[in-house]
Image: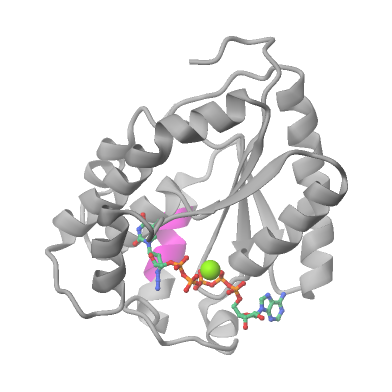
Amino acid sequence: GLSASESRGAFIVLEGLDRSGKSSQCANLLSFLNKQGIAAEAWRFPDRSTGIGNMISSYLSSSADLDDRTVHLLFSANRWEKSSLLETKLREGTTLVVDRYSYSGVAFSAAKGLDFNWCKAPDEGLPAADLVLYLNISPEIAAARGGYGAERYENLNFQKKVANCYKRLQDSTWKTIDATKSIDDVQEDIRKAVLLVIAKCSQGQELHRLWS
Ligand code: Z5A
Ligand code: MG
């Protein structure tokens, strides 16, 4: 683990329903941070580049059918396989802007009907985000945006269940962002919150672990 007082990068996660704008905001945030001279990388989960990520990808595109618990554990394993690199990056002072993380893992699987605490268990002990930016939008407004409907979970009823599960995960590290504003206005709100957390982490804020 990281001792208090050691300067490090911040672990920022963007969460929210499908089409809430996470990927667009991550890309904008990364170029903003880099322009400010802040060392930062953009990551995303699932990381489809690994062997496990490949299995997840074919499941999401519906070309492979997997049991719900099996796919849940694959998503979790996909985070564990990246976790030591993730910690190394933070310790080296790199801020990570991460598009989805364990919070998606729990929200999506619990929305399918799996037990909420069972869903949390495999991610216990992973690095916890310093800041979770929850891009808040109704499933109806999100569905009206481009590209909706291509993958497995993209239907209104399911997205409503996901939103309820996200609510149960919120703690003091979460900041709710109004994702119905324009892309630029959402980005403004995100930058303010992110710069504060980056400053705290550079002063040595301790890295926490899920789920504490
Ligand atoms: N999943 C899981 O089950 N378990 C896990 O552990 C994890 C994930 C980690 C793949 O995710 C699926 O995996 C996902 C959860 C599940 N479920 N599904 N389906 P993904 O991250 O690969 O999903 P995605 O396809 O990249 O996109 P997304 O997340 O659905 O969208 P987004 O990144 O939030 O939005 P966007 O791509 O930035 O924007 C969407 C569109 O809206 C685009 O046309 C934008 O130009 C437009 N947009 C964005 N912002 C705005 C604003 N402010 N106004 C108007 N229009 C906007
Ligand atoms: Mg996305």
The residue range painted magenta reads 161-166
Instruction: Residue 67: name its quadrant.
Output: bottom left
Q: How many marks?
A: 0
Counting from the top left corner in percent of width and height, residue 46 is at: 39, 57
Q: How is the image coloured?
A: one colour
In this view, 153 is above or below 118: below
The residue closer to the viewer here, 168 or 191, is 191
Q: Quadrant of the C terminus?
A: top left
Q: Residue at x 69, y 43 (%)?
A: 40
Can residue 178 be seen here? The reply is no
The answer to whether one can see residue 28 in this image is: yes
| Location of residue 200 (image quadrant) | top right
Q: Can you give x and y, in whole percent of width and height, for residue 173 in the image?
A: 60, 37
Say which residue appears at 46% left-offset and 34% top-offset. 85
Specify whether residue 125 is painted magenta. no
Compared with 165, 207 (above or below) is: above
Q: Nearer the viewer, residue 168 or 185?
A: 185
Residue 151 spot, x, y in % from top left: 36, 80
Of the pair 113 and 186, the residue shown nearer to us: 186
33 is higher (above) or lower (below) than 156: above
Residue at position x 22%, y 62% in the image? 113
Q: Name the residue rendered at 27%, 44% in the picture.
A: 77
